[in-house]
Image: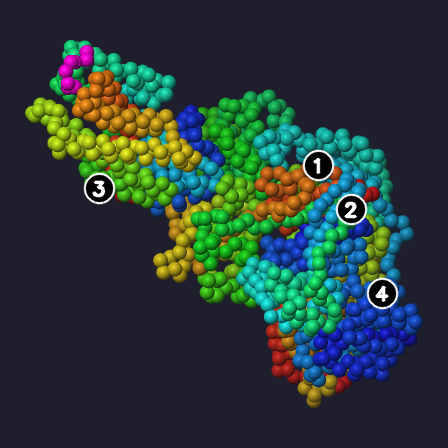
Amino acid sequence: MDKKLAVYICSGCGIGDSLNVDKLLQLSSDEQKVTVCRKHKALCSVDGYNTILKDIETEKFHGLAIAACSPRVKTEVFDFPKNIIAERINLREQVVWCSEPGDEDTQMLAEDYLRMGIAKIKNISAIKPYIADSISSDILVIGGGITGITAAIEGAKAGYNIYLVEKEKELGGKLNSFYKQYPANEPFNILIDPIISDRIKEINSYKNIKVYTSTTIKEISGQPGNFDVILLNGKEVKIQVGSIVTSMGWEPYDANKLSHLGYGKYENVVTNIEFETLIKSNPDIQLPKNILFIQCAGSRDKDHLPYCSDYCCSTTLKHAKYIRELNPESSVFVIYKDIRTPGLSEEFYKEVQKDNQVFFTKGTVSDITPENNQLKVTVKETLLGDDISVKVDMIVLATGMTPAGTEDMNLTYRLGKGLPKLKYNFSDSHFICFPYETRRTGIYAAGAVRAPMDVASCLEDASGAMLKAIQCIEATKRGESVHPRAGDKTYPELYMDRCTDCKRCTEECPFGTYDETEKGTPLVNPSRCRRCGICLGSCPERVISFSDYSINSVSAMIKAVEIPDEFEEKPRILVFVCENDAYPALDMAGSKGLKYSPYVRIIPVRCLGSVNKVWISDALSCGYDGILQIGCKPGDDYQCHFIHGSELTQTRGENIQETLTTMMLEPERIKTEFIEITDYYRIPDIINSYVETIEDIGPNPFKDM
Amino acid sequence: MSGVTAAVEIAEVGRQVILVEEKPYLGGNVIKMNNYFPKLCPPSCGLEINFRRIRQNSRIKCFTSTTVKEISGEINNFRVKLLHKPNFINNNCTACGNCTEVCPEERPNEFDYGFSKTKAIYLPHEMAFPMKYSLDVKYCKKESCNKCVEVCDYDAINLSAKDEEETIEASSVIIATGWKNPDAAAIKNLGYKDYKNVITNVEFERLIDANGPGGDKLLKPSDGKEPKEIAFVQCAGSRDENYLPYCSAVCCSASLKHALSIQNKYPDSKVKIFYIDLRVSGRNEDFLRKVEENKNIELIKGKVAKITESEDKSKLVVEAEDMLESRKIKSEADLVVLATGITPNQYNLNIYRSGEGFISDKQKDGIYPVACCKRPMDVSSSVKDATAAALKSIQLTS
Amino acid sequence: MIDISPDIEFKKELKRLSKSSLNECMQCGTCSVVCTLAPEERPFPRKEMIWAGWGMKDNLIANTDIWLCHQCGDCSTHCPRNVKPADVFSAIRQISYQHYACPKILRKIVNRPALLPVAILIPVIIIAGILLLAGTFRIPDGPVNYSKFFPHAWLNSSFSLITFLSYSFAISGLVKFWNDLKRSRPEAKPKNGLLISLFKNRSGILSHSKFGKCNTQKSRKISHFLVFYGFIMLLVVTAFAIIAAITHNYPLAFTNPFKILGNVAAVMLVIGLSIMILNRLINKNSINSTYTDWSFLISLFILSVSGVVVEAARFLNWQSAYHLYFFHLVCVWYVIIYLPYSKFGHLVYRTVAIAFANSIGRK
């Protein structure tokens, strides 16, 4: 322990009133041997900050601890040179604001936090980011439909070199077979010509876009900043890119499964896409007199696509409109579940409704039978007050979208060739606030491969995904993580001598950071890493660490706490809290003045998934009476920012219970609670009731050993 | 939400961003929401991440309590005139709360739409970013009281602060001025003005919020009791030529979300949702199914056209035609939530507007409107739009 | 089960007559809720609006609910899509009674603005013809005495005969209408036949209770009440007058109770009609008025005013009294003889429809 350290204790915001700050200073200098120990009545003031700066210059210490408010506030004030390790100790929100002022236990709580903070500084090192030697700023766009083309153009406009790869002979994708597009903006009374041909022309005007048609991807390996891509178009072409936009598009739902709606049975039953293609190929075709559209054909249907494809309602409105323009004799019938023209598109619905020969009703098609060269369609549950039947010459099924598979990306990742899928095979983000997050860092999905969407939405999506791709390259150049720990410059460092090739890290990393040798030895790709520390939590051999977060640093914090002996009747509960939601909730509980037991010792963790079993056994053998973990909700509607971090806590829990059994300890000594960030009012109850449970069980028998 | 997203996305590419917000806190309408559909997760979770991204990113300069007076110039060379509202409380504020304790004046809390009160000097809400206090000049007695100034240890309060103008330069401008609820009182037959227990959906967000006026209970505004039967009135003003001719895109999903939130809190309560069309997009269909499967939530196709009170005035009566049954129904409820829609916030700026006051997509080069000031959309779409605009805004400067 | 084959021409006619949009209806049901007359079960006008949108003429022209509507306009005021169900209903009613009126040629003559001269010329020629036959087609000398100009026997017999013919046609239409109504609701068996139903339903019609329920235009109850009773009273007076012309001395003395009743009735009509006309002018936006509406209102108004004027002319011995009398007779023809073909027909069709509604228990 040759690090020269400093401790600054703030006495403002009630800290000085509630705690004996001088005793804390004394503890720092006498017990912890800290070189510089000062108190200040407002460390965040200009004077406070200048005091620290001056010390940094004169005392040349390695690390400093600021014992004041939560690290979530005044972050911009406590900004120090990067070579100094600076640690914030939360005496305000999590000590004095949530405990009885002047109480012996409150003082002990503060003392322990001081010890833990100092222990942490001693056991972490200054951050040196991982920056690869050569980082490519080029971007690969996979899929040359409207989304891919738009992404390429928008990226090129921002000055990046783009490779656009399309497996078909020509660019354009689905939109090539479109006769018209429906309007997404004013004016809503005219259909627009497909924009695709102009876009394809535009793409040729950019020197920094290289287009590969009739090309597939043989392999993608590497990591953000250094993806090695092998393209196949007769021969192999090797390129290197910094990031990737995947816009592999969609396929219409297989209408052969819709025989109950007459598809495949009757010649005059076609899908909306077939209809569109038909008109595109021959706009002068003689359209039949009566055409009926069945909305949600195979959509919103648990036997087919359970979801809504978002584009079918407006597409049918478009069809109705041009049918009427092409043949004024035609009548159009639309049978719907709900007309979904959200937002300003309502205007388009109204526009088509104006026509005298377009007929709408909610209803369920119950029967289709041929009758004199026509099809007699029976509709139940209509708004007309009765079942109805209509004789028509043609039926168009408004079928939905299914996402194209992304396996053709041929990622050489340990965790699979394609992008992880969310639900119904879409490669989407699960987050409302972060729609572009995929679980493969540096690869961003755009367009209908990600979620059902129409052309207008694809255009936005293309730009957004391209921005994220650019951002990822720039962050990688700085050695920073991307979302959600954006700006984090630490990365996983592996001490391979101890590795047993158990593969837990490669399997549990939600983002596919680790590849494997044939033997199963993990190969880390630091730029793929999101710095959640789940691998750190998974490793039984203490192989993985981050410069400011490691098995040792947390163990040291655990061990730094003074455990009173069992006769003092002061239990100690170790609480691991997720930094993302649980920690802010604790802060808010404090700022709302909610009091809870001072017997808890809180350690923030990057994710509950990063909690290593070693810490648990360390804590139990040190004499903690119980361990509480508080994290984000797992399950279908999970809120874990690292996808399955909090879920892993549950699966690993069984393993840990075994440890308890071997140590002859009660299972209640470890408990996990899930909360939301806004659940701060539940904190006192969660903590206090757990403390009660532990008090009932009695002290940890390992206390004095 | 859109502005914050655009700002962090641009800054993380490595560009400089100035974020201007009229209110004393970031997060707009979204921070007032109880939860998001379809996961029923709290918005402050994602916002906390974004605030952290702002806190630690020196490329973002953030001005709260500031409005834009004028945008002039051209792409790569915009001059934006800002008006900083009086900075009564400076950045010395540690949010210790001593001032609030001594403040003798109360004000209706706009954050809770007036359903609760705060002192004249107040923390806008528990998650406020920046985490500092605010002062409502309308209710503050200023120097004649001066109690807060006396009690502040950090020299953070200056009651004589004046507003200041400042002109900044920018190469591009993203407009994310967002939306507001239209005035529900204008819809005469729905009784918003006449009955206390007829509230809007945004008000409901606060009432159901555990950090809202009722704590973790949902309380009726009239008598502070918990409602047992709740009715949701979809398209309250939306899809209506007499009010908003367009669809507001989010209200269907929002009401489904509210219904489930109520059921989570009060599993025995009865919820009815009256609608014209259920507009729940894409995979949120699962969410709709979850609601359909809940036997205490009833979805009724038919627009509510009348809200009255029962004879003993203990209940509200909503009337609609259940169209699938072709029957007029009168349904009693303790609380009625009007799914009012989205109208764009209006600022006197030299920008093009389209119908209904929304800002047009087509602006001069370098000006990019995003999200709900442009058209009604949900949070996820807004974020998507903001990210797309982030790319546009860096194209010119590279 | 309804087999649907939309009648586009019917839709176009509806839109032309009602001047309302039709297709924009998005089926929200607001109209049914705000309508105070619509029954709880199968309320109108929402379902009729989708029928109209789908061009389902057969369902609409023989439809009781069309006649339960008193066109107060509540639905039109509240419609979120600016559709005017009240006007669409009015147009459907018009198409309906014109559908049942025969001969068709008269229906056209009465309801087409272009044929107004023909509609007027027919009574002019026929009345002139009768006068020629009676040999009195000239201005008599002496104090004004209309029977010198148009002998009562001629007048009463000829007008009665023509009215009888016209109404006979009308009744055949009504019977057809009644039968179509029955067909439109096969599941609902009317408890009584046409006549008994009519009798049973007298009080609702006589008290005008339905009008009172309308929110948008309260004054309509009063005006319709005035016109309705004014007209009934005049019919009674006329009937008495015809008898009096045979059995008593005619013209009646000014103080004769029937004469007084006639005069009061005339005043009621003039006031009621004035309110109606003003109403239509003021509420142009919420209530659409077609040619048929105007021609009926104005002809009845002119009839009432001319009646008063003709009476005055007699007492005051005006020079032009006989010209005015001739004009008045043309008006009588226009209103009374054309009744089955003009909007006046709604009096009978509505009565029949409401009677039917009551007989099947629909209120």
Callouts 2 and 1 in the same chain: no
Expressed as whole percent of the image width and height from the top left, the position of residue A386 reads 39, 39
Callouts 4 and 2 in the same chain: no
Left or right, B384 with respect to A472, comes to left
Callouts 3 and 1 in the same chain: no
Callouts 3 and 4 in the same chain: no
Q: Which residue is mark 2?
A: B170
Q: Are marks 2 and 1 in contact (CB under 8 Å)?
A: no
Q: Amino acid at mark 3?
A: Ser
Q: Does label 1 or label 4 sit earlier along the sequence?
A: 4
Q: Main secondary structure of the magenta part?
A: loop
Magenta region, residue range: C137-146
Please report the residue visible at 51 percent of the width from the left and 33 percent of the height from the top.
A353
> Considering the numbered disc 3 on the image, is that residue within a helix, a strand or a loop?
helix
* Chain identity of mark 4: A
Q: Residues within 10 Å of mark 2 (few under 14, many from 20)?
A: some
Residue A478, picture quadrant? bottom right
Q: Looking at the figure, which quarter contains the N terminus of chain C? A: top left
Q: Which residue is mark 4?
A: A80
Gap between marks 3 and 4 measured at Cα:
93 Å
Query: Camera-side residue: B206 or A4?
Result: B206
Callouts 3 and 2 in the same chain: no
Please report the residue visible at 64 percent of the width from the left and 76 percent of the height from the top.
A595
> Considering the numbered disc 2 on the image, is that residue within a helix, a strand or a loop?
strand
Gap between marks 1 and 4 measured at Cα:
47 Å
Please report the residue visible at 39 percent of the width from the left and 50 percent of the height from the top.
B329
* Chain identity of mark 3: C
> Considering the numbered disc 1 on the image, is that residue within a helix, a strand or a loop?
helix
